[in-house]
Image (tube, rainbow, N blue to C red):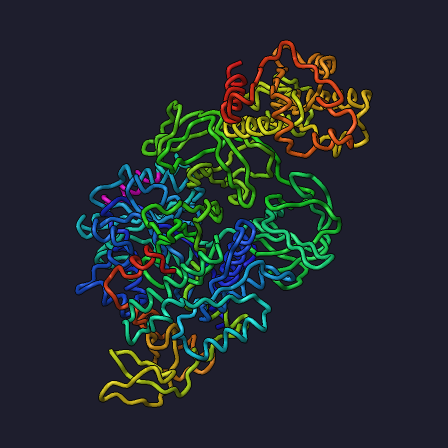
C-alpha cells in the first residue's frame, strides 16, 4: 500500500508506420510482463493475436487499421504507465497529436527491413512539435532481419540524424522482435552484440514527468470560488513553481499586485503547494480576477501580449483562411483570434519550408496570430500550459487547430507596455479596418437603434471592431447631469461626438444613434472628424408611423402634455439636407437597410 | 523537484476537469450511479469547490432493479453531502412492467437505462453530464475523449471525435448538443480502490464480502435481492460469502466468491486477480462491439 501511493507515472506515446507492429509490441510487452488479464488474453484467440488488443472500434477491426488513439494503463513494481497508442495514417495525424500532447516520451517503431520511412519522419516531427524531447527508437522485426547488428546500426544512425534536426535531445535505440518477445522483458540471447537495456528496463528507469517546480510560479485561474460573504478564492492547477502563504503575486493581464493569504490543496488548508496540484488561493487585496487570468510570481511574471508568432497544426476539413476569426483557447483563457499571416508551411514529411496562402488538414504552418485582447503567456518550449492553444471554428465549433506560441510580436508589446506615440493609422492597421463614425439621426421611434444594432451584428460577423453609442443609454451615465433644454441638448451632442471621435481614434467603427434634431449640432459633430471618417445616416420615418410604433410610449406622453420639448411634437426636427445615406424605413425592411449600410462601409 | 504520486496527479487532473465543466457549461449535472466510481467522483467534486458547494445537482437514473442497499446508500449520501439529488425513472417502462426477467438484459437496459437517461437529460436540458467511466474498463471506452461530444440525439460518432490536446478542452456546443465528461478517464480500477482507501471514502457495503443469498444462473452468481426473481426448476438459494466488483441492476450483476471484508483485502485480491471487472456484467457479454454500438445509440 505505502509503495503504491508513492508510485510515479510515465505517460508515453507509441507511434510508427502501419504494419510496423505497434499494437503487437504493446500486447506482447503486457503479456510478457504478466499484465494481461485472462479474459483479455482469451479474446485474442489461439495463438494470441496481440494486435487485436487495442483496436477498439468496429471500423478499426474491419479495416485492420488504427483510427483513433487508444489509452492503455498498466503498472509494474517500479511505476505506473499510461500508453497512448496512436494511429499511423497521415489522415489521422490529428488523433496522433492528441496522444502526443500529454506524453513525455515517444516510443517510435521502425521495421528493421524498411528502415526510417516517411511516416517515421512525420510522427517524429509531430512529437517534436508538441514538445517531446525523449524518444525510444524500437527497431522491430529483427527476427526477419537475421538479428543483424549492421541493420540495427544503420537505422540508428539515420534516425539520430533526423532527431538532431528536430531538436529531440535524447534517443535510446533498442533492437527487438515484438512478435517473439526479444528484448521486451527478456534479454534476447539471439542478439548478444546489443548491450543496452530491454524495453521494459528502460521504461522503468527513464525519468518520468519533469515538473516545473523550479520554474516561476504560475496559476491560470479556472474558477472563482465565492462562498458566503467573505470568501473569494481563485482555483486552478498550479502549472509551474511553488506557492506559499505570504508570497508576492501579480494578476495578469491587469498587472495588479497583492499577496497570497491562504493556500488550499483541494479542500485542505495548507501553507504551500507545488506544480501539478489543483489548488485554490485567497489574496490579501480585493482585486478583479476572472477565469482565464493568470496569477504569477511578482518577481518573475510572464509576458502579456495580443499578437504572436506560433506553429499550428491544422486539423479541420475546412482549410485555414488567414483573416477569418476563430475562438482561441489557451488553458482557461479564451479570445477571438485571427491568423494575420502564414509565414510558411512546413512539409511534415521532409521538414522543408514552403510559402503558403492557406493550410489544409494535417498541414503545419508558422503563422502570426492576432487576438482581440491581451493574455498572459509563455513560449511553449518553456511552459506547455501557457503556450499550448487550440483554435475553434466559430460556426461548426470544431477543434480546428492546435498550436504552440513561440514569441510575442514586438508590435503588440509596444502597444501594451510602452505607450509609444502610435497614431490612428497604426491602430487602424492592426485592427484591419477603416475606423469611422456613422451618425444615425431621425425622429424618436424612427428605427435608428434597431438598424444600428443590426448593422453592428453584421459588422461583428465580418470581424469588424465596433461600438454603438445610443442616446438613451448615454443619458443614463455620461450625460446623466443633462436635461432637455436647448443648451443641454447641444452639450449632449458635443460630449457624444467627442467620445465617438476618441473611439474612432482608437480604431473602432462607431455607430451613434441619436435623435440629434438640429443641423448645427450635427455639423459640429462632423467637423470633429477627418474627411471620409464621418457619415450621416438619415433614418427617415413619417411621424405618423413613429407615433403609431411609439415603442417607449413617449409620443403619448408628449401629446398628453406630460413631456416638454419633444421632437416632432412641440420641438422641431431639422431633416438632413445632404446625408451620406437616406433610409426610408416604410419602404425597406430593417435587414435590407442594414445590409445597405454594411455595403456602404465595406465599399468606401 | 516534487514527487507527486500517480494518485496525486490523477486527483489534480480530475479536479481540473470538474472545474472546467462548472465554468464552461450552463447546466451541468453529475451522473451518479451509486457505485465506487461515482463515490470517487462525488468526493472529487466536493473537494474541487470547497468551501463552496458544487454548482450542479446529481442525477440518478433508477432502473427500479438496483440493489436495495444501493438506494439506501444513495439517499444517505445525498443527505450527508447536501447535494441536490434528482432521481429519474422511465415511467413508460414502469407502465409496461419492463424488467430483465421479462424483457431480457438488452431490452431492459435500453429502456430503463439508455432511454431513461436521454429522457432525463432532455427534461432538465443538461448540457454537460459527468460520468465515472474509465478508459481501462473496455476497448471502445479506451478511445473516448474526456469531453465527449454528443449530437442533439445524444449520439456518439467515434470517427468524428474532436481532437483533445493537453488539458485544453473544447467546451463549446450548440443548443441541444451536449457533452459527456469523464473525469476518471485515466484512472484504473486499482487507482480507484487505492484512492478510496487513502481518502476514506464511503462505498456501498456490497463491495465487501458477506454471506448473501445467491443463485447460480448462466455462469453468474446472482444475489436474489427481492421476490421478483423467481427460481427456475432445480435452482436453490444458498448463502455464500460473496462481494461485487461492479454494481448495477441486481439480476444482471455477477458476484464473486470472496473473503475480502476491508479495503486492504480488496486491493490485495484485485492485485492477484486474473480477470477484468466487466466479467461480472451480463450486459457486456453481447457480441464484440456491443459497448460501442450502445454508446452510439446514447448509452452512457
- Seen at 67% across and 34% down, the residue is A552
Q: Nearer the viewer, residue A432 or A80?
A: A432
Judge whether residue B270 can be spotted in this image: no
Q: Is residue B261 above or below residue A247?
A: below
A406 inside magenta stretch: no
Residue A76 in picture, x, y percent from top left? 39, 65
Q: Nearer the viewer, residue A375 or A568?
A: A568
Q: Is residue A523 above or below residue A416?
A: above
Q: Nearer the viewer, residue A339 or A562?
A: A562
Q: Is residue A549 above or below residue A128?
A: above
Q: Nearer the viewer, residue A530 or B98?
A: B98
A151 inside magenta stretch: yes
Q: Is residue A537 left or right of residue A86?
A: right
Task: Kindly report the secondary structure that dominates the magenta region of the rendered protein.
Answer: helix
- Seen at 31% across and 61% down, the residue is B291
Choose top left, top right, bottom left or bottom right for residue B209: bottom left
Q: Is residue A252 left or right of residue A142?
A: right
Q: Is residue A63 above or below residue A327?
A: below
- Residue range in magenta is A150-160
Amino acid at each position: 500500500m505505502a509503495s503504491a501511493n508513492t508510485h510515479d507515472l510515465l505517460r508515453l506515446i507509441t507511434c510508427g508506420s502501419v504494419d510496423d507492429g505497434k499494437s503487437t509490441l504493446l500486447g506482447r510487452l503486457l503479456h510478457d510482463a504478466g499484465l494481461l488479464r485472462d479474459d483479455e488474453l482469451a479474446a485474442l484467440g489461439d495463438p494470441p493475436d496481440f494486435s487485436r488488443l487495442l483496436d477498439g472500434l468496429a471500423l478499426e477491426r474491419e479495416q485492420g487499421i488504427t483510427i483513433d488513439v487508444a489509452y492503455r494503463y498498466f503498472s509494474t513494481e517500479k511505476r505506473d504507465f499510461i500508453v497512448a497508442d496512436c494511429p499511423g495514417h497521415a489522415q489521422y495525424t490529428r488523433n496522433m497529436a492528441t496522444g502526443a500532447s500529454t506524453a513525455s516520451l515517444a516510443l517510435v517503431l521502425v521495421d528493421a527491413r524498411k528502415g526510417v520511412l516517411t511516416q517515421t519522419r512525420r510522427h517524429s516531427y509531430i512529437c517534436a512539435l508538441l514538445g517531446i524531447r525523449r524518444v525510444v527508437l524500437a527497431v522491430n522485426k529483427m527476427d526477419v532481419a537475421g538479428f543483424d547488428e549492421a541493420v540495427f546500426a544503420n537505422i540508428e544512425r539515420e534516425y539520430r540524424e533526423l532527431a538532431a534536426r528536430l531538436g529531440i535531445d535524447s534517443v535510446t535505440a533498442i533492437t527487438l522482435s515484438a512478435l517473439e518477445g526479444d528484448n521486451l522483458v527478456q534479454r534476447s540471447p539471439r542478439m548478444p552484440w546489443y548491450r543496452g537495456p530491454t524495453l521494459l528496463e528502460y521504461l522503468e528507469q527513464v525519468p518520468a514527468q519533469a515538473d516545473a517546480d523550479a520554474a516561476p510560479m504560475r496559476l491560470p485561474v479556472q474558477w472563482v470560488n465565492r462562498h458566503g460573504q467573505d470568501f473569494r478564492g481563485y482555483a486552478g492547477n498550479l502549472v509551474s513553481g511553488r506557492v506559499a502563504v505570504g508570497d508576492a503575486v501579480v494578476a495578469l493581464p491587469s498587472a495588479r499586485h497583492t499577496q497570497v493569504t491562504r493556500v488550499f490543496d483541494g479542500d485542505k488548508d495548507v501553507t504551500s503547494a507545488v506544480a501539478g496540484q489543483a489548488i485554490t488561493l485567497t489574496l490579501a487585496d480585493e482585486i478583479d480576477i476572472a477565469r482565464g487570468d493568470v496569477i504569477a510570481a511578482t518577481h518573475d511574471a510572464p509576458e502579456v501580449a495580443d499578437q504572436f508568432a506560433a506553429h499550428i497544426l491544422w486539423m479541420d476539413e475546412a482549410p485555414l483562411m488567414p483573416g477569418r476569426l476563430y475562438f482561441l483557447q489557451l488553458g482557461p483563457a479564451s479570445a477571438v483570434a485571427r491568423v494575420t499571416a502564414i509565414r510558411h508551411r512546413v512539409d511534415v514529411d521532409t521538414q522543408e519550408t514552403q510559402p503558403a496562402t492557406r493550410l489544409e488538414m494535417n498541414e503545419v504552418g508558422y503563422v502570426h496570430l492576432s487576438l482581440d485582447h491581451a493574455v498572459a503567456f509563455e513560449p511553449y518550449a518553456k511552459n506547455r500550459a501557457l503556450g499550448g492553444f487550440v483554435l475553434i471554428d466559430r460556426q461548426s465549433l470544431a477543434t480546428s487547430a492546435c498550436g504552440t506560441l513561440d514569441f510575442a510580436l514586438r508590435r503588440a508589446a509596444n502597444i501594451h507596455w510602452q505607450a509609444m506615440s502610435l497614431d490612428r493609422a497604426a491602430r487602424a492597421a492592426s485592427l484591419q479596418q477603416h475606423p469611422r463614425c456613422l451618425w444615425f439621426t431621425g425622429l424618436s421611434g424612427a428605427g435608428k437603434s434597431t438598424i444600428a444594432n443590426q448593422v453592428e451584428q453584421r459588422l461583428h460577423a465580418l470581424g469588424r471592431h465596433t461600438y454603438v453609442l445610443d442616446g438613451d443609454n448615454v443619458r443614463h451615465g455620461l450625460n446623466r447631469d443633462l436635461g432637455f433644454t436647448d443648451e443641454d441638448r447641444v452639450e449632449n451632442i458635443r460630449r457624444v461626438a467627442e467620445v465617438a471621435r476618441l473611439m474612432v481614434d482608437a480604431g473602432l467603427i462607431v455607430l451613434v444613434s441619436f435623435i440629434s434634431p438640429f443641423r448645427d449640432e450635427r455639423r459640429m459633430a462632423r467637423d470633429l472628424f477627418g474627411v471620409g471618417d464621418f457619415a450621416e445616416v438619415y433614418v427617415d420615418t413619417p411621424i405618423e408611423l413613429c407615433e403609431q410604433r411609439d415603442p417607449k410610449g413617449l409620443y403619448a406622453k408628449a401629446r398628453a402634455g406630460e413631456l416638454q420639448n419633444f421632437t416632432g411634437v412641440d420641438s422641431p426636427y431639422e431633416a438632413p439636407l445632404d446625408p451620406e445615406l437616406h433610409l426610408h424605413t416604410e419602404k425597406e425592411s430593417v435587414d435590407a437597410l442594414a445590409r445597405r449600410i454594411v455595403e456602404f462601409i465595406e465599399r468606401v | 523537484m516534487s514527487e507527486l504520486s500517480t494518485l496525486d496527479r490523477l486527483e489534480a487532473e480530475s479536479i481540473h476537469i470538474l472545474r472546467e465543466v462548472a465554468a464552461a457549461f450552463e447546466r451541468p449535472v453529475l451522473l451518479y450511479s451509486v457505485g465506487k466510481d461515482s463515490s470517487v467522483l462525488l468526493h472529487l467534486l466536493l473537494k474541487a469547490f470547497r468551501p463552496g458547494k458544487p454548482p450542479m445537482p446529481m442525477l440518478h437514473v433508477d432502473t427500479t432493479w438496483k440493489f436495495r442497499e444501493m438506494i439506501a446508500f444513495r439517499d444517505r449520501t445525498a443527505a450527508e453531502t447536501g447535494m441536490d439529488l434528482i432521481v429519474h425513472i422511465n415511467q413508460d417502462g414502469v407502465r409496461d412492467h419492463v424488467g430483465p426477467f421479462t424483457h431480457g438484459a438488452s431490452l431492459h437496459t435500453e429502456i430503463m437505462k439508455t432511454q431513461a437517461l436521454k429522457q432525463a437529460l432532455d427534461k432538465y436540458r443538461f448540457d454537460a453530464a459527468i460520468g465515472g467511466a474509465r478508459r481501462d474498463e473496455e476497448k471502445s471506452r479506451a478511445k473516448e475523449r474526456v469531453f465527449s461530444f454528443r449530437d442533439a440525439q445524444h449520439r456518439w460518432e467515434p470517427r468524428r471525435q474532436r481532437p483533445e490536446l493537453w488539458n485544453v478542452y473544447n467546451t463549446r456546443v450548440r443548443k441541444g448538443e451536449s457533452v459527456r465528461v469523464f473525469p476518471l478517464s485515466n484512472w484504473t480500477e486499482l487507482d480507484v480502490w487505492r484512492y478510496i482507501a487513502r481518502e476514506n471514502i464511503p462505498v456501498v457495503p456490497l463491495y465487501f464480502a458477506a454471506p448473501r443469498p445467491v443463485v447460480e444462473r448462466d455462469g453468474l452468481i446472482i444475489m436474489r435481492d427481492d421476490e421478483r426473481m423467481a427460481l427456475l426448476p432445480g435452482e436453490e438459494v444458498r448463502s455464500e460469502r460473496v462481494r461485487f466488483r461492479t454494481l448495477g441492476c441486481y439480476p444482471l450483476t455477477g458476484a464473486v466468491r470472496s473473503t475480502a471484508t476491508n479495503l486492504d483485502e480488496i486491493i490485495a485480491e484485485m492485485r492477484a486477480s486474473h480477470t477484468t471487472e466487466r466479467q461480472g456484467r451480463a450486459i457486456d457479454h453481447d457480441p464484440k462491439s456491443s459497448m460501442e454500438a450502445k454508446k452510439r445509440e446514447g448509452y452512457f
